[in-house]
Image (spheres, rainbow, N blue to C red):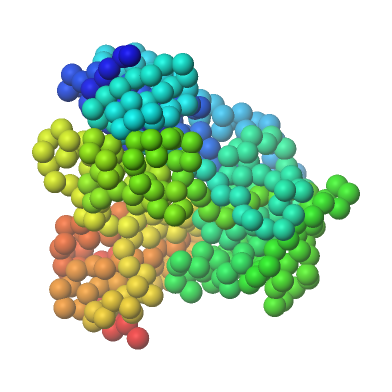
């Protein structure tokens, strides 16, 4: 049986980076991947969807060209096969580059097959059994399929299979009004599909503040996306060539008929076929591997990184998991998951950049909170680009003067939010940013000015 000093299961954002670091220290490392190197982000998540966002943005701007004094001429068309080819080329470059790096790296052996524990120190992959004293699990997650009536009787798409289509759905019904559903819904509406988003909650992205949800709904509906909220009961059926979604909503028709259905109702970890019981590794009732603040499982010598540990659901949290584990294992550092600040973006157009507390969180915190806001209609950069939808909000602790959180919805806000993120990590008072000189004309330039308008949170 081949013995290694470390085994890395899965090649998402944490696994390969960790393998390279371990190998650079002279360790013999086995990396196991059962499907596509790069995991969700590279193959069916961030990379392909953001490539589609870019194509959809180009189509939208072409339609708006006359607003900018640009004559395009004729009807704007979208070549879906070319859109997919562009997306696939971008994905392939990333995946193939990572694959080659793993295959050619000194001290790394790449196994292609499914991994399954047979003991706390041994893993089977294909017909081979390998062992190591350190095993790092980075198996990611997949789309959850809801247990709703009729789901087994209709064809449906997930975020993964959606990346394989090279045609334009006539009417795409999206079940799920959160991050994945809204991004894909807006993309395909801009390509030319009729789109209806169906959400069981009373508002979109219900984890955000109510006015953020309302603003996102207004943005989408202004473009022509249909939004159905409060769908307490959803059932699915096939009617000739159409998929019928029956709804129990307080408003609107009791059913929506479309040509295609996307299920975007959440994710689940890829832990069910790993044989974790044979290794003694504990999972919670949703299948996520239980880890401590340094990402160690209950079994010494086994760590879990990325989406499968339930401590984050983003590429950047997975990569940060790698940084935490590498620092602790290789450098004797004491980095912890609890040290990081929650931050993410929703890549609708315009995008939402989020960090730290929401207003709802702040009200529950018991702190004396100050808040400052500015609509994008008062930000020069947004006006110059004719992209004035959204607003900027920053929350501050009235006593410590540290920034608690921010919601930035508007053009460029997925980048501008990082100025706030860095200041939160520095634990610096907001006055540091308020007194900084930012560059004109940008969205970020208004952050110091906005902080001059702080008022007590109601």
In the visual, does 8 lie left or right of 233? Answer: left
In the depicted view, which residue is nearer to us: 253 or 71?
A: 253
Residue 455 picture quarter: bottom left
- Which quadrant of the rendered structure holds the N terminus? top left
In the depicted view, which residue is nearer to us: 83 or 110?
A: 110
In the depicted view, which residue is nearer to us: 419 or 158?
A: 158
Name of the residue lying farthest toward the bottom: 458
Tell me if I can see residue 289 in this picture: yes
In the visual, does 225 lie left or right of 324? Answer: right
Residue at 59%, 52% (x, y): give it: 264
Residue at 16%, 57% (x, y): give it: 426
Place of residue 138 in the rendered image (x, y in percent of width and height, measured from the top left): 37, 36
- Which quadrant of the rendered structure holds the C terminus? bottom left
Place of residue 444 in the rendered image (x, y in percent of width and height, measured from the top left): 32, 59
Q: Is residue 42 above or below residue 360?
A: above
In the depicted view, which residue is nearer to us: 138 or 67?
A: 138
Residue at 65%, 70% (x, y): give it: 232
In the visual, does 293 lie left or right of 158? Answer: left
Place of residue 152 in the rendered image (x, y in percent of width and height, measured from the top left): 72, 48
Residue at 46%, 66% (x, y): give it: 207
Name of the residue lying farthest toward the left: 332
Q: How many marks?
A: 0
Q: Is residue 106 above or below residue 226?
A: above
């Amino acid at each position: 049986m081949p013995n290694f000093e470390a085994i890395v299961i899965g090649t998402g954002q944490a696994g390969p980076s960790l393998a390279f670091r371990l190998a650079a220290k002279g360790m013999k490392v086995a990396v196991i991947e059962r499907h596509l190197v790069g995991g969700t982000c590279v193959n069916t998540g961030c990379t392909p969807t953001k490539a589609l966002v870019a194509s959809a943005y180009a189509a939208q701007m072409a339609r708006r060209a006359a607003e900018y004094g640009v004559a395009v001429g004729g009807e704007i068309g979208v070549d879906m096969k070319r859109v997919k080819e562009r997306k696939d080329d971008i994905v392939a470059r990333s995946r193939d580059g990572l694959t080659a790096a793993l295959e050619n790296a000194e001290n790394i052996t790449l196994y292609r097959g499914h991994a399954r524990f047979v003991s706390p120190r041994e893993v089977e992959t294909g017909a081979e059994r390998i062992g190591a004293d350190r095993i790092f699990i980075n198996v990611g997650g997949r789309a959850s399929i809801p247990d709703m009536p009729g789901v087994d009787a209709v064809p449906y798409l997930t975020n993964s299979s959606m990346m394989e289509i090279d045609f334009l759905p006539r009417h795409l019904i999206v079940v799920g009004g959160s991050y994945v559903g809204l991004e894909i819904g807006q993309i395909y509406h801009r390509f030319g599909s009729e789109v209806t988003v169906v959400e069981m909650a009373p508002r979109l992205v219900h984890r955000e503040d109510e006015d953020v949800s309302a603003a996102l709904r207004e943005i989408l509906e202004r473009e022509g996306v249909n939004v159905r909220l409060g769908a307490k009961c959803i059932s699915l059926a096939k009617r000739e060539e159409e998929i019928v979604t029956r709804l129990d909503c307080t408003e609107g028709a009791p059913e929506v008929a479309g040509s295609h259905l996307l299920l975007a109702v959440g994710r689940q970890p890829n832990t069910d076929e790993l044989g974790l019981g044979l290794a003694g590794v504990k999972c919670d009732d949703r299948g996520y591997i239980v880890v401590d603040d340094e990402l160690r499982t209950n079994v010494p010598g086994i760590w879990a990184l990325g989406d499968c540990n339930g401590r984050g659901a983003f590429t950047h949290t997975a990569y940060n998991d790698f940084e935490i584990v590498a620092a602790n294992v290789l450098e004797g550092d004491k980095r912890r998951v609890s040290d990081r600040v929650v931050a993410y973006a929703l890549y609708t157009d315009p995008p939402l950049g989020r960090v730290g507390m929401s207003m709802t969180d702040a009200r529950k915190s018991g702190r004396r909170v100050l808040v400052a806001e500015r609509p994008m209609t008062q930000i020069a950069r947004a006006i110059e680009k004719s992209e004035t939808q959204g607003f900027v909000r920053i929350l501050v602790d009235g006593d410590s003067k540290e920034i608690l959180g921010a919601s930035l919805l508007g053009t460029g806000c997925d980048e501008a939010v990082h100025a706030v993120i860095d200041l939160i990590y520095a634990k610096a008072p907001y006055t540091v940013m308020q007194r900084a000189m930012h560059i004109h004309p940008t969205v970020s330039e208004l952050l110091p000015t906005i902080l001059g308008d702080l008022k007590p949170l109601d």
